[in-house]
Image (cartoon, rainbow, N blue to C red):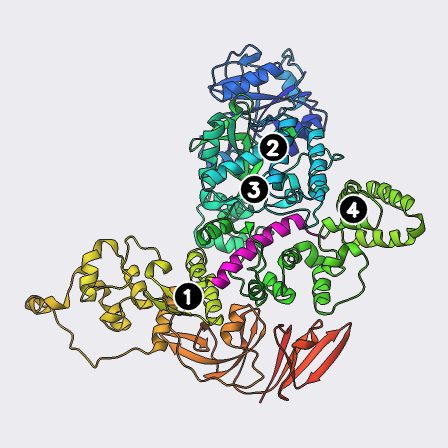
Amino acid sequence: MRIAFVCSAFDLFESTVLPDKLAKHLKKENYELCVVIDSHLGSAYDFYASLAVEGISVIPGLRKDGKYYIPLTEKGFFQLIRFSNSLETELTDIQVIDGPPKNLKPDSKSPIWEVRYLETKDKELFEQYRQIGGKNKLEGNYHLLSAREYDSLFDGKLQLPEFRFPKFEHKFPLSPSPEEFKKTVSDKLQKLGFSAEPYKNRLKYELDVVSSKGLESYFSTVAEVVNIADKIGCWTGPGRGSAVSSLMVRVLGITAVDPVENELYFERFLSAARKDFPDIDLDVEDEMRQDLIKALKRKFGKRKVALIQTYGTYSFRSAIRAAGKIYDLSELQLKELIKSSRNGRTLPSSLARDASIRKSFKLAKLLIGLPSTESIHAAGVLLSAEPLDEIIPLRESDGTYISRWTMNSLEALGFQKLDLLGLKNLSILKKLYEEKPWQEKPIDPKTYEFIGKGYTTGLFQLESTEATRIVKMVKPQNISDIAVSLALNRPGPLESGITREYLKRRVMKSNEVFSRALADTLGVLVFQEQVISVAVKELGLTPEEGEALRRALSKKKPEEAEKLIAKSLERNTETSERVKELVEILRRFSGYGFNKSHSVAYSLITYWLAFKKFHAPDEFFKVLFSLLDREGRARLAAEMKSMGLSFALGEGHMNGVISLCPSDLMKFRLELPIKPIETSFHEFVRKRRSSFMAKDLEFLVKIGYFDKYGTRESLLKEINNALSGVDPELKSVLRVFGYKEQQPGRIKTESSKEKAVLEYEALGFNLTEFPVVLSQEDFVDTTLTDLYATKSNGLAAYSLVNLREKRFITDGKTLIPIYRSLPEKGFIIFKKGKPDEKRAYEKIKLVTRKYNQPVPIESILPASKQNILKIKIDGNVLTLKGAKVIAYDPDEVEVIED
């Protein structure tokens, strides 16, 4: 029997052998068995699953302290796991092989030849890979022996039994009986006030399915995780994914959406006919995720909680940087190589002349796909009723166990992870509300109107340009409209034309609703659950069959789909043509819909962020500001101004004014007073010199914090003096030692415009507003601030600001930097909220606005003859002279200069 002892590439930098290429080489040389060796048992299942397909047996092996440990039975496998986790255990069912492998000592009696790369030609790559990982060079060769080489070294007497990975039965920490679970859930239903018959019947049905599948322990454990989160003050979201469609999950407090009211199908989440395990993901506030994991360890025990291992692999970018270190490439060479090679596609001849670059490029291409780092799954957590260190190979990081088996291996072996996803928006909401707001009804019309205007910075899932465009066209009036808006911004609806068709019907109501199941989305199939709804209401299928049809159509399984379609035709003989018509539409669009359950739950986060943004904009601004990048802060500030608000530094309670302290805008090492109280700038700095750097003072000067002490320009020049202790009051003494006092010139005051530019330098936007004279022509769409704030298309009037070697366009409220020479005053076209500097005009004769789809007739208003409107309707173009559209962005704006 030929046995290959293969070191795994997942034992970082110890091997270049990955599962996908190994089988071909083993079969070629007639190996019958492969012992996968690593230092932690973490990669054995990956090799086991890959090689089993090719008919090659695999046994996991552990290398530790120069010895090799191989399990002979299932009992021995668990002994080996405990041993690898440093638990005391008897190694009764394990074969221990001592002594160096024949790679190192040809006359060794060891039956082992370590395989660390597949072919002799791979030796150089292996040695360079080890060098990158900081490993010492190994003596000897480590290729896979040919049949002839193997037979010349070994007598084939080593016999190892066939090994099968055990199938685990994951035991969750909580394990109520079916009767206890049903009583708990039924009691909670009554407490929540869901007493109507549809709720009782729905819950009974769901509980029966759960009981038939023996899932009480899983759901109880997830509910307990939410309960633990509540106890430590860690917010969980209103729901995520298809779990939102379960009334039982809602009653347990895991989600906050009523699936009956929202017409969500339980079968989308769990079905008696499906064998797959239910998958509940929990959103938790990102700032307390680690606290929650610690709380889980306190509740269930450290040994019963584990995170999950992942591996980072080399991409071309990371590989070329690793290879560049070996061949001493400079940062400049690396950047040029990444750019000019089009991320590794080809090596330009201009660079290939350099031997070091050529060698680095070759090595990088070989490194791609090899493991480079060990990491931790962003969300996955294992919770167990039994100690995990007795059944899973683990490592420890910051006091928490990490499963050495990856997510895919764990699921294949029978374990079910729980995803705890850190969500920044929950942390933001917690700062804005004392309690989770989604217990209240989302019924404020002003909030919906506000969202529809495009003020989307900081609004969950609506911040992107495309999402903002969609929600401005939808103009939501209720929570369902927000759910639709979120769904329309997904790749499936966007690419299939679903989004375009829905938005068209949103404006031009159509009576062509091909199924009553789609009435709430204007006859357009937007959600996956609508496939089930059509199947139930139109095709005569059960919800369970409807879900099976949806899965068959979306996963391109025609045989399964045809069986269900045949059932529908049997049940609808009188309307068979209608059934066929519906089925064809489902075939075309069912693969593009989005999960309604997920969308409905996430729309609550969006709504409640928008509610606070509209009703308490100052509070919202201060919470969100530090979490945004420079561009996001600028847009948020523009939104506030577009809403009619202004900014002021210092304490104040004026209506329409957002009063800011320096700490709202930047973090400092000490607490600053709202306003400085010292008699001079130098005195202020002297008292706090050890806590300030020059850049801190520069920031404070530019935003106007020290305006009481003089002009900002003069104070900027005093920063270094203040930090070094040179006080003007001491100049008469210093003059004795050669200090030359500058003669004061004429006292200069600063304009609001100059202050605004300094604020822009510090913040990325201006606090101070200033008067400008702008054209009031009616061919202007709105202000520059409005277009920028709402990411809109349109035409705005501007005035040019040229100060401190920078150029801006402005309407007096907002400064937007530009880089081309423009007229001092004029008009400029905005595209998706950004000015097109190539399309700025001093005078305008005619403006044509084009719309690629219809607009509501009530949004068309009369205007001067300088305005022309072109609207595409069903392939035809309607041209209106002397007309404009309000509340809807044009797709294109064309200008004829005067």
For residue 282, the mark is 3
- Magenta stretch, residue numbers: 593-615
As helix, strand or loop, the secondary structure at mark 3 comes to strand
Q: Residues within 10 Å of mark 1 (few under 14, many from 20)?
A: many
Q: Is residue 219 above or below residue 113?
A: below
Q: CA distance from mark 4 to mark 1?
A: 50 Å
Q: Which tag is nearer the camera, tag 2 or tag 3?
A: 2
Give the amino acid type for the residue marked by disc 4 in the picture.
Leu
Q: Which tag is nearer the camera, tag 3 or tag 1?
A: 3
Callout 2–callout 3 Cβ contact below 8 Å: no
In this figure, which residue is indicated by the disc labeled 1?
764
Q: Residues within 10 Å of mark 3 (few under 14, many from 20)?
A: many
For residue 553, the mark is 4
Callout 3–callout 4 Cβ contact below 8 Å: no
Out of 194 and 219, give the one closest to the viewer: 194
Give the amino acid type for the residue marked by disc 1 in the picture.
Gly
Please give the name of the residue rendered at 86% of the width and 55% of the height, measured from the top-left corner: 581
